[in-house]
Image (tube, helix red, strand yellow):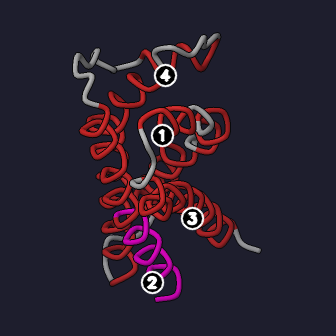
Amino acid sequence: MTLIRMSHLLCLLLVAIAMALTLAHALELPGKMLLDRDTYLAIQKIYYPGFTIGGAAEPLGIVALLLLLYFAPPDGSRYWWALVAFGALVAMHLIYWFVTHPVNNFWTRDIKLEGLGATFFSLFAPKISSDDWMQLRNVWEYSHVARAVLGMVSFICLARAIVA
């Protein structure tokens, strides 16, 4: 297997993981919207260990796609499909930091986090003063729907770039 094929496979794997995690959240939305406050707040805490680890695929995917674009010739459709995949993944990541992450910080405020988890959830997270859990729930849930759509766009465009 050539180095180029291996880099394509790595990019596709990282984008697929990033897409899958946020798609899982989006697919839970109909059921989670039926939960009462206490149940909703209780189950929000179960996500953070595994999803935080898997979330590393997003920035790694961005870097891998950026490298792929840097070394790819900017002529032909492969480059442009990969560029759209990169843009969608960056947009997905920006939604996380500016919309989802501040709400995550609110959900985790009562959890005793240590080490890397404590550092991660305190990064770039303004303190939310709202105690309107339904508004925060809606922001969190629908931000994941938007992220899932962008993840799928990124995955499909990257797959198209690879098979072009």
Give yes or no for contact between labels 4 and 1 (Cβ–Cβ under 8 Å).
no
Give yes or no for contact between labels 1 and 2 (Cβ–Cβ under 8 Å).
no
Give yes or no for contact between labels 4 and 3 (Cβ–Cβ under 8 Å).
no
| Front residue of this view, candidates 99 and 82 | 99
Residue visible at 45% across and 48% down?
35
Residue with the mark numbered 1 = 40
Q: SS of the residue at dot 1?
A: helix
Q: What label sits on residue 123 in the rendered view? A: none
**Is 134 left, or right, of 111 in this rendering?**
left
The span shown in magenta is 150-164
Residue with the mark numbered 4 = 108
Give yes or no for contact between labels 2 and 3 (Cβ–Cβ under 8 Å).
no
**Amino acid found under the numbered disc labelled 3:** Ala
Residue with the mark numbered 2 = 160
Q: Is residue 151 above or below residue 129?
A: below
Q: CA distance from mark 1 to mark 2?
A: 38 Å
Q: Position of residue 116 (x, y in %)?
A: 61, 17
Q: Position of residue 80 (x, y in %)?
A: 31, 74
**Amino acid found under the numbered disc labelled 1:** Tyr
**Is 11 left, or right, of 154 in this rendering?**
right
| Front residue of this view, candidates 11 and 67 | 11
Judge depth for marks 2 and 4 and give the one in front.
4
Q: Is residue 52 above or below residue 13?
A: above
| Front residue of this view, candidates 134 and 71 | 134
Q: CA distance from mark 3 to mark 1?
A: 27 Å
Between discs 4 and 1, the one toward the N terminus: 1
- Other residues around mark 3 within 10 Å, as few (<14) / some (14–19) / many (≥20): many
Q: CA distance from mark 4 to mark 3?
A: 27 Å
